[in-house]
Image (cartoon, rainbow, N blue to C red):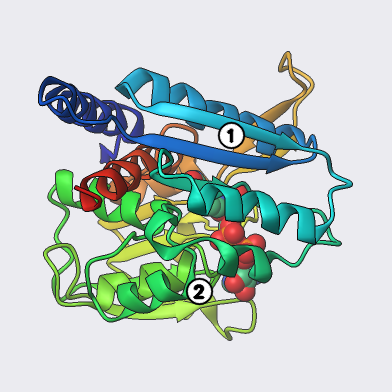
Amino acid sequence: MILLDGKKTASNIKDEIALKVKSLKNKGKKVPHLAAIIVGNDGASLTYVNAKVKDCKQVGFDSTLIKLSKEITEQELLSEIDKLNKNNDIDGFIVQLPLPKHINEQNVIMAIHPDKDVDGFHPTNVGKMALNLPTFISATPFGILELLGRYKVKTEGKHVVVIGRSHIVGSPMSILLSQKRTVGNSTVTLTHSRTKNLKEITLQADIIVAALGIPEFLTADMVKDNVTVIDVGITRVDDTTKKNGYRLAGDVKFDEVSKKCAFITPVPGGVGPMTRAMLLKNTLLARINKE
Ligand code: NAD
């Protein structure tokens, strides 16, 4: 079994990005500038967004964190977005999800200018992704492609089973891996909560991408030998032995499934760090696109 080490790979990618930033600086050009909007005080969201700001510092990007009260109206949030759209110094920005219930997420995503939508969630960018045109690919599926590519996991002609059809992970993952691209050319089955006989399907998979958010859902009896497993799930599970009172659990029962695997990602240290690295890659791309 080979561990797909997302932490190490992400660190390599960040080194590569830092070199590119240096070269931009040496040529007297502006370094990439990422802004992030966070609404409210949700602990997990704050952790994610702070990590993204820290990543920016690490690679030499400028960053701006905009913290807004959870009472903000949708209109006020849209006007903050408008300011970022018009601010020439900002190359790309994200709005950390989820948002409070009274704000319509779709309206917010639609308000972000596609050229600055480094999360790749705007319908224009999703459409370009689906057509295999150059665009911002959303960070989690982009990170998975990169991880598979760097470890030279063969995807061509393989049967990939994706579990979960969210707009940010499962759905784009299924589209990307079925496309004609270096990491792609797979035969993909997209499964979800209404899928019948899931185990019969996963048992046929050469590669499984588990993105459903149910801790330790995928068990050893659901996979064949030599399978490759990408565990996207991150759930905080109560754990009194930990100082912070929780541990992070993936969607895969790692101890038993890993014994049957050719390749597998750990949680933490797999897809999570890759997601963060690819947001940086998209921000660099946004900067370069403006040259
Ligand atoms: P989501 O919650 O939006 O959707 C879950 C999907 O799983 C749905 O499509 C649903 O149909 C499917 N599903 C639910 N129960 C199922 C079942 N029993 N069998 C088959 N399918 C089932 O999902 P999401 O936003 O893609 O997140 C999934 C997980 O990935 C979560 O744990 C989330 O925290 C994690 N995540 C991790 C990263 C990362 O960077 N590592 C990024 C995004 C999401």
Q: Which sits in the foreground, 127 or 80? A: 80
Is label 1 within 8 A of ligand 1 (CB to nearest ligand atom)? no
Q: Amino acid at mark 2?
A: Lys
Does 200 appear above or below 226? below
Q: Residue 199 shows which numbered tag?
A: 2
**Residue under label 1:** 49
Percent position of residue 71, x then y:
89, 47
**Does residue 72 appear in this view?**
yes
Which residue is drawn at the image coordinates 53% and 73% (left, top)? 165
Q: Which sits in the foreground, 103 or 268? A: 103
Tag 2 near tag 1, CB within 8 Å: no
Tell me which corner region of the image, top left, top right, bottom left or bottom right, holds residue 187.
Answer: bottom left
The reply, left or right, for residue 223 in relation to residue 185 is right
Percent position of residue 189, x then y:
38, 80
How packed mark 1 is, by other alpha carbons closer than 10 Å (few <14, some 14-19, many 20 or more), is many
The reply, left or right, for residue 272 in relation to residue 11 is right
Percent position of residue 45, x then y:
67, 38
How packed mark 2 is, by other alpha carbons closer than 10 Å (few <14, some 14-19, many 20 or more), is some
Q: Amino acid at mark 1?
A: Val
Percent position of residue 127, x then y:
38, 79
